[in-house]
Image (tube, rainbow, N blue to C red):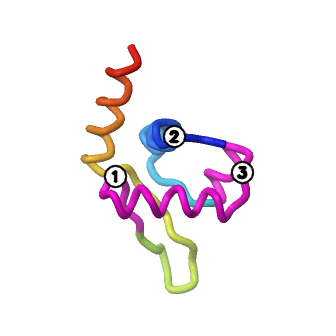
Amino acid sequence: MFDMRDLLSYLAHTDEAGASDIARAFGVRHDVAAMGLLRLVRQGLATRERAGAQSAYRYRLSQRGRSRLTYLQDRTS
């Protein structure tokens, strides 16, 4: 499983990612990855968009997400 910090960190190190990318990287089911990403979007920590009408969502870390990741990293160091 993964936590918010892991997911934020992953997005910080990629330009964009889809739920299938997250699922492979963390070894979780696609629906688990998709729900984690949706939670980030709803909290304003990530953005999502479709490349085309039939394509899957692609996610990017928002500025608020970068700030939250910095905060979480500072708390643990």
**What number is the disc on residue 45?**
1
Compared to residue 20, the image places residue 53 above or below, namely below
- Residue density around tag 2, few if under 14, some if 14–19, many if 20 or more, within 10 Å: some
Dot 3 or dot 1: first in sequence order is: 3
Q: CA distance from mark 3 to mark 1?
A: 21 Å
> Picture coordinates of residue 39 (x, y %)?
44, 59
Which label sits in the foreground, 2 or 3?
3
Magenta run includes residue 3: no
Q: Circle 1 sits in a helix, a strand or a loop, which is it?
A: loop
Q: CA distance from mark 2 to mark 3?
A: 14 Å
Dot 1 or dot 2: first in sequence order is: 2
Q: Residue at x 36, y 64 (%)?
A: 42
Q: CA distance from mark 1 to mark 2?
A: 13 Å
Horizontal arrangement in the rendering, residue 50 relative to residue 28 (left or right): left
Compared to residue 70, the image places residue 11 above or below, namely below
Magenta region: which residues?
A: 20-48
> Picture coordinates of residue 20 (x, y %)?
66, 59
| Residue under pointer 2 | 10
**What number is the disc on residue 28?**
3
Q: Tell me if label 1 and label 2 are in contact, CB under 8 Å.
A: no
Q: Amino acid at mark 2?
A: Tyr
Q: Amino acid at mark 3?
A: Val
Q: Circle 3 sits in a helix, a strand or a loop, which is it?
A: loop
Compared to residue 74, the image places residue 24 above or below, namely below
